[in-house]
Image (cartoon, helix red, strand yellow):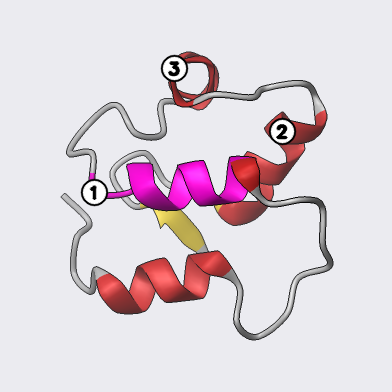
Amino acid sequence: MFVCNCKSVTENDIKKLKGQGVGNIRELGSRCGAGTDCGSCVFWLEEILQTKNQSSNKDSLAQEAASANPGTGD
């Protein structure tokens, strides 16, 4: 599921980068571009970065982001 529609970055992409030591939005943006365009995903990116590693489920943050921002694929 996409978290950043502008840069086509998924929740799994963010989690992989988090596992590689990325710990803030600025570094995340420099690595994959997420959060550097329209900014509507920044809240969700911060949530993912701050959440302890948990297994994905139906109520993942990305699904919440997609439902909260339908059609934001500039």
Quickly name the residue at label 2: 18
At a point 39% along the width and 67% down the height, the residue shown is 65
- Looking at the image, residue 29 lies above or below residue 38: above
Counting from the top left corner in percent of width and height, residue 17 is at 70, 31
Residue 9 visible in the displayed image? no
**Foreground: 30 or 23?**
23
Residue 52 visible in the displayed image? yes
Quickly name the residue at label 1: 40
Q: Is disc 2 placed on a helix, strand or loop?
A: helix
- Looking at the image, residue 31 lies above or below residue 52: above
Quickly name the residue at label 3: 26
At a point 23% along the width and 74% down the height, the residue shown is 70
Q: Is residue 59 magenta?
A: no
Q: Is residue 43 magenta?
A: yes
Q: Which residues are magenta?
A: 40-49
Residue 53 horizontal side relative to residue 6, left or right: right
Circle 3 residues within 10 Å: few <14, some 14–19, many ≥20: few
At a point 44% along the width and 53% down the height, the residue shown is 44
Q: Is disc 3 placed on a helix, strand or loop?
A: helix
Q: Amino acid at mark 3?
A: Arg
Q: Amino acid at mark 1?
A: Ser
Residue 43 horizontal side relative to residue 59, left or right: left
Counting from the top left corner in percent of width and height, residue 68 is at 28, 74
Q: Amino acid at mark 2?
A: Lys
